[in-house]
Image (cartoon, rainbow, N blue to C red):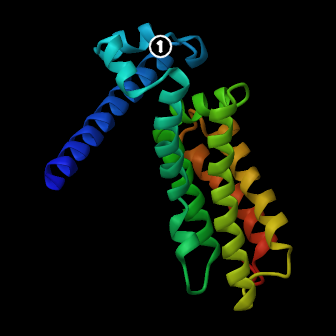
Amino acid sequence: MPSTTRRSKAARADRKSDIEERMRQAITKLVADGERFTELSVERLVAEAGMARSTFYVYFEDKGALLRAIGASTLHTFYEGAQAWFENRGEVTYEDVRTAMRGLLEAFQANEVVMGAVAETAVYDPEVGEMYQESVDGFVGAVRKLIQRGQKDGTIRDVHPAETATALSWMIERTTLQRAQGATPKQLDAIATGLADVIWGTLYVAAR
């Protein structure tokens, strides 16, 4: 019986993932066609996704719940773009930082419609706002640990870990949202370089 229960839970999880992906594609298509996420109705979304309204409500209480579900996974993917920088236990170079920023920007562009919808909705939806804040807080925490680790081995300057991590993280978040949407590869290179310049100049002891 337990194995049957596990299979049932796994099947439901797979089904929910499939529904989320279909809704993600529907949102992306509709916004690309010029509609604003905040103005899209559930009826419009399910019609574009080719699913019954009743199916939507099996998995999501409302449009906000949908956005929290797909937004959480999207934000995780976004911040994973900089994972190599966080996990580097050796000597960090300027190019390591720049590559991490480029990866983060590319991850944003791959999901920019959902990222934009999350950021927009977070302003007035408390639950989406809380999810977004928690996501940024997680990134801040990773940067703080990176600073503390670097200070122990003498590669990062004597800056305040928590406050510096907060400032850098929100700089990355704001710059990405304001500058990366629709940017060309050449423009992404320039944005990544700008972010890396600030991070390198703020944190690292060694000269570029």
Please tell me whether mark 1 sits on a helix, a strand or a loop. Answer: loop
Q: Residue at x 63, y 58 (%)?
A: 138
Residue drawn at (29%, 42%) of the image? 13
Identify which residue is drawn at 43% across, 26% down.
60
Which residue is the extreme one toward the front?
1
Residue 106 at least partly seen: no
Q: Quadrant of the C terminus?
A: bottom right
x and y, in percent, of residue 186 in the image? 56, 46
Question: In this orientation, which residue lies closer to the viewer: 17 or 205?
Answer: 17
Q: Is residue 13 left or right of residue 75?
A: left
In the picture, measured across the screen, residue 8 lies left or right of residue 57, that is left
Asked where in the image residue 18 lies, by quadrant, the reply is top left
Q: Is residue 117 above or below residue 34?
A: below
Relative depth, front residue between 197 and 70: 70
What percent of the width, then of the height, locates residue 71? Answer: 52, 38
Observer able to see residue 144: yes
Amino acid type, callout 1? Asp
Q: Which residue is mark 1?
A: 33
Mark 1, other Cα within 10 Å: few <14 / some 14–19 / many ≥20: few
Q: Residue at point 61% right, 40% down?
A: 180
Is residue 106 found left or right of 45 in the rendered image? right
Q: Judge by depth and name the residue closer to the eye, 143 or 3.
A: 3
In the displayed structure image, the side of residue 85 where residue 69 appears, left or right:
left
Q: Position of residue 199 (x, y in %)?
A: 74, 65
